[in-house]
């Protein structure tokens, strides 16, 4: 009798413990705790005057509130998925879409498109390698080179390979920078900051492993540029290399030539310093995680793999738009980018074809690290699509030899050396290419 009672009591205890556990709100797992701590740090850094910030967890993200019931525009997604899982989920989404299409009797073409997408995803491009771990080995080669150079010289020790004081997921401040002067004061060397006139920085306590030119094609996006500079200078400094930010501005009214401007940025930057690494980025793309390395690993790299605009997914496997990096010798080897894409679209697909043709492996950060916010402030319509882009894409491989760095035409009208950035003001017209 007593032993029966004991068993009953034991079962009752187990059931009620389970019941209570499921009602305790906000229990965090290890990953969530890690994100929460980082987040707390960022909130404090962001708003040191406001001591009353409360952090609450809502479903899969944290939000910061203050007393005045203003919900701060801060949100960090908790994503514990591995890159592999992310990809599996993507294929699963497509399969669900296909099932829905069949259920709703959508037309054959819709179904065929989704089917094709799935096939494409399954047979994944073998030239693309996704980091499955946070740390890359890509810099090893570079480190060896620099150590060799350093052997007989005195000076500070080498900078750590992947920066220091990295934060991880970052707060993205999309508020307007009304006046650039206070930011220049805060960051510029003239008033005690670290950024040298012209928008460059080099670590002083250690010898940098690489010299990176950040190149931005630009026209009429000043509000976005200011937000970019506010975010990127501290970001890049934590990565502990020499860098300089160049804006290549296309003057006059011809259609925007994004790839041509990258080529010009490259050509002009190497006249200024011995850059060995080039990051080509749009002005409206701000990285959400500083473990996303802005140097150059062994092969060309596509960094903007998970953009909020695309729901943090790759829109297609071979995309190379947004932000990417190249070692100098690799960019020269592919003859840079094409100069013939005038208007929106195609130039990045052409670049992808060049990389493939030369047999380079493309690397990418894991989806949870290569995350970006596309700044929407003053986001005007993209330029008109280039009507000739599909034709050009037919001949990407053949054109590589005679369309690129070796056939670049432009006039450099002015170099403006501002406290946080260097501008190249450019005249580049279709008529220069007999178009
Ligand atoms: C493709 C474009 C790419 C572009 C991508 C994403 O269709 O240049 O869309 O565009 N290719 C062609 O037009 C051939 S986005 O939505 O980011 O503006 O990068």
Image (cartoon, rainbow, N blue to C red):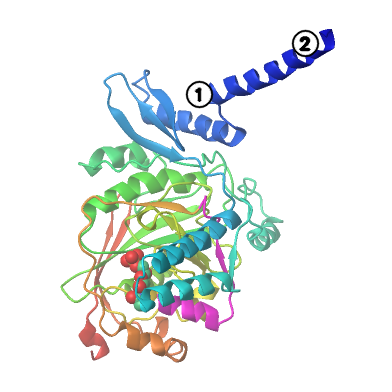
Q: Which residue is mark 1?
A: 25
Can residue 94 be seen from the camera position used here? Answer: yes
Vertically, is 283 above or below 291?
below
Q: Is residue 349 left or right of residue 203?
A: left
User: In which quadrant of the rendered view does residue 387 lie?
Assistant: bottom left
Is tag 1's residue or tag 2's residue first in the polypeptide sequence? 2
Q: Residues within 10 Å of mark 1 (few under 14, many from 20)?
A: few
Nearer to the camera, 44 or 318: 318
Q: Can the viewer see residue 259 in this picture? A: no
Q: Which residues are magenta?
A: 349-369
Q: Is residue 96 above or below residue 66?
A: below
Quadrant in which the N terminus appears: top right
Q: Is residue 26 magenta?
A: no
Residue under label 2, please give it.
Answer: 5
Q: Residue at x 56, y 26 (%)?
A: 22
Check disc 2: other Cα within 10 Å, few if <14, some if 14-19, many if 20+: few
Looking at the rendered structure, the secondary structure element under dot 2 is helix
- Could you tell me if the residues under marks 1 and 2 are in contact, i.e. CB atoms within 8 Å? no
Viewer-side residue, 399 vs 14: 14
Q: Is residue 423 above or below residue 228?
A: below
Q: Secondary structure at mark 1?
A: loop
Q: Position of residue 103 (x, y in %)?
A: 41, 65
In magenta segment, residue 362: yes
Q: CA distance from mark 1 to mark 2?
A: 32 Å
Q: Is mark 2 within 8 Å of ligand 1?
A: no
Query: What number is the disc on residue 63?
Result: none
Foreground of the two, 310 or 103 = 103
Left or right of residue 97, residue 344 in this image: left
Q: State which image quarter holds ligand 1.
A: bottom left
């Amino acid at each position: 009798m007593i032993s029966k009672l004991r068993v009953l009591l034991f079962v009752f205890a187990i059931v009620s413990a389970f019941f209570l556990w499921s009602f305790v709100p906000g229990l965090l797992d290890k990953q969530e705790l890690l994100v929460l701590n980082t987040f707390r740090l960022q909130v404090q850094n962001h708003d040191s005057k406001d001591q009353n910030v409360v952090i609450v967890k809502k479903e899969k993200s944290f939000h910061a509130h203050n007393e005045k019931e203003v919900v701060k525009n801060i949100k960090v997604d908790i994503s514990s998925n591995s890159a592999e899982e992310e990809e599996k989920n993507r294929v699963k989404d497509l399969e669900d879409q296909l099932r829905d299409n069949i259920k709703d009797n959508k037309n054959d073409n819709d179904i065929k498109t989704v089917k094709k997408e799935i096939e494409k995803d399954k047979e994944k491009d073998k030239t693309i390698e996704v980091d499955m771990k946070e740390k890359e080995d890509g810099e090893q080669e570079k480190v060896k080179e620099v150590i060799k150079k350093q052997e007989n010289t005195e000076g500070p020790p080498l900078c750590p390979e992947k920066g220091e004081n990295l934060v991880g997921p970052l707060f993205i401040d999309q508020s307007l920078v009304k006046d650039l002067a206070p930011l220049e004061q805060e960051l510029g060397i003239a008033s005690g900051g670290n950024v040298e006139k012209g928008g460059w920085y080099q670590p002083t306590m250690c010898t940098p492993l690489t010299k990176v030119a950040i190149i931005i094609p630009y026209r009429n996006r000043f509000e976005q540029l200011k937000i970019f500079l506010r975010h990127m200078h501290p970001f890049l400094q934590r990565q502990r290399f020499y860098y300089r930010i160049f804006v290549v501005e296309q003057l006059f009214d011809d259609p925007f030539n994004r790839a041509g401007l990258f080529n010009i940025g490259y050509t002009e930057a190497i006249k200024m310093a011995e850059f060995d690494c080039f990051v080509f980025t749009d002005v409206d793309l701000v990285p959400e995680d500083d473990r996303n390395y802005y140097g150059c690993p062994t092969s060309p790299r596509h960094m903007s793999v998970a953009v909020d605009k695309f729901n943090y997914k790759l829109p297609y496997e071979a995309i190379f738009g947004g932000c990417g990096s190249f070692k100098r010798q690799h960019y020269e080897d592919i003859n840079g980018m094409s100069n013939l894409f005038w208007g929106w679209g195609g130039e990045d697909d052409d670049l992808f074809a060049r990389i493939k043709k030369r047999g380079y492996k493309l690397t990418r950060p894991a989806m949870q690290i290569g995350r970006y916010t596309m700044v929407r402030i003053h986001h005007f319509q993209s330029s008109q699509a280039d009507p000739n882009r599909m034709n050009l894409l037919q001949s990407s491989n053949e054109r590589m030899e005679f369309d690129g760095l070796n056939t670049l035409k432009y006039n450099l009208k002015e170099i403006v050396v501002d406290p946080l950035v260097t501008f190249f003001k450019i005249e580049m017209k279709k008529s220069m290419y007999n178009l």
